[in-house]
Image (cartoon, rainbow, N blue to C red):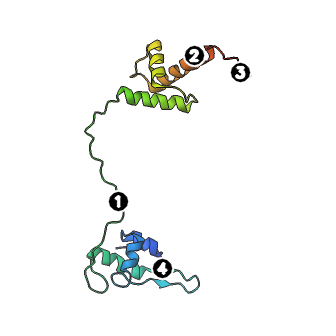
Amino acid sequence: MCVEKSAISVSEMAKMVGLSRTRFYQLVGSAFPYPIYDLATRRPYYPPELQEICLEVRRTNRGIDGKPVLFHRRGKEPSTPKPSRRKTTPTHDSRYRELLDGLRSLGMAGVTTSDLEKALKELQMPLNQDQGGVLRAVFLKLKHQDTSAPVNKKNSK
């Protein structure tokens, strides 16, 4: 075991041994040695000698008091994702959702699925084309429909 730093904080020591700070503090005094306190800053730290002892305690699962120590795993460790049993091909609903989200991000908050289906049918565009191209064409089609719609004169003033 090679210790690189001349002094480390208690948090860093806890991380080095793979424990949460809380659990590490619970074990200080029985399993792990107490840190040394800097008189000027009043901050605890671990010099290389104590770092070696802490790492040895973790490696052997035997505390400085000679008793066995049970360590908990620190937080949730990343695991390999389990393969999904669902089909990976996108359904029409998910593709519509992506297009609707795209249109809404472009300022068309009132667009519905039926508006989208109607525009796709008029454009004769299949959903399996380039998503960006489909989004652009549908956006322009719906935008053109909005501008060609009759203007309500009551609300225009």
Task: Kindly check if marks 2 and 4 are in contact, taking CB atoms under 8 A apart as contact.
Answer: no
Decide which of 71, 144 is in the foreground and name it: 144
Quick one: SS at disc 2?
Answer: helix
Of marks 2 and 3, which one's residue comes earlier in the chain?
2
Q: Which residue is mark 2?
A: 145
Mark 3: secondary structure: loop
Q: Are marks 1 and 4 in contact (CB under 8 Å)?
A: no
Considering only order in the chain, which callout, 4 or 1, is on the residue closer to the N terminus? 4
Label whose residue precedes the other's in the sequence (3 or 1): 1
Mark 1 vs mark 4: in front: 1
Please identify, in this view, whether the residue under mark 3 or under mark 4 is nearer the observer: 3
Q: Residues within 10 Å of mark 2 (few under 14, many from 20)?
A: few
Query: Tag on residue 76?
Result: 1
Q: Foreground residue, 49 or 67?
A: 67
Residue 28: percent from the left, percent from the top? 38, 81
Amino acid on which the number 1 mark rests in the picture? Lys
Tag 3: amino acid: Ser
Say which residue appears at 48% left-offset and 29% top-offset.
Answer: 100
